[in-house]
Amino acid sequence: MSAPAYDDQNVFAKILRGDLPSHKIYEDDMTVAIMDIMPRGDGHVLVIPKAPSRNIFDIAQDDLNAVMATVQKLAHAVVKAFGAQGTTIQQFSEPAGGQVVFHTHVHVIPRFDGVSLRPHTGEMADNDVLAAHAEKIRAVLG
């Protein structure tokens, strides 16, 4: 499969450069975790590699390994922070797969028995709510 080239003007590239604000929860040498500004559930976070890649098809193996290690760390943290019973982990690749932002990212969403995911409406969450949720997760991470 041949995909278009990586576009360094995507929203996550801008966040990584500091051109756009985010609620950062975690950072290491290879990854960053931020609050999703259009959360499908309370505590919905995104894990993104620092190195540029569009998605699962072109990410370097070391970057993918680092992303998944951070996904696991954040899955534990969001479940503890929100008292969730589980988590949904999602990664979308290319438009046919549901990808909208073309920088590799993985969704980590705390889940609760009997509570459906909110629909993806495109509406941004309240900034104060996102900040409070970010603080709850950071507190668990230490």
Image (cartoon, grey):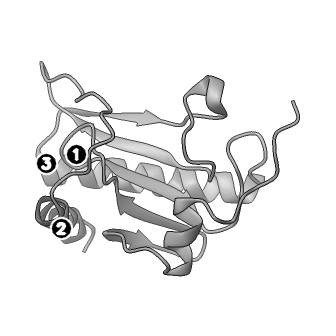
* Quarter of the rendering occupied by the N terminus: top right
Residue 122 pos. (x, y %): 33, 40
Residue 127, placed above or below residue 125: below
Residue 47: image tag: none
Q: Quadrant of residue 4?
A: top right
Mark 1 and mark 2 in contact? Answer it, CB < 8 Å: no
Residue 133 pos. (x, y %): 16, 60
- Three-letter amino acid code at the position of disc 1: Val
Mark 3: secondary structure: helix
Residue at (45%, 73%) from the top-left corner? 27
- Three-letter amino acid code at the position of disc 3: Phe
Residue pointed to by mark 3: 82
Q: CA distance from mark 2 to mark 3?
A: 14 Å
Q: Quadrant of residue 113?
A: top left
Which residue extends farthest top? 114
Q: Quadrant of residue 130?
A: bottom left
Q: Is residue 21 left or right of residue 77?
A: right
Circle 1 crowding by C-alpha within 10 Å: few under 14, some 14–19, many from 20: many
Which residue extends farthest bottom? 18
Residue 25, placed above or below residue 58: below
Mark 2: secondary structure: helix
Closer to us: 35 or 29: 35
Residue at (69%, 67%) from the top-left corner? 51
Sequence-wise first label, 2 or 3: 3
Residue 108 pos. (x, y %): 37, 44
Residue pointed to by mark 2: 131
- Please name which of the two marks, 1 or 2, marks the residue nearer to the observer: 2
Circle 3 crowding by C-alpha within 10 Å: few under 14, some 14–19, many from 20: some
Residue pointed to by mark 1: 79
Q: CA distance from mark 1 to mark 2?
A: 17 Å
Q: CA distance from mark 3 to mark 1?
A: 6 Å
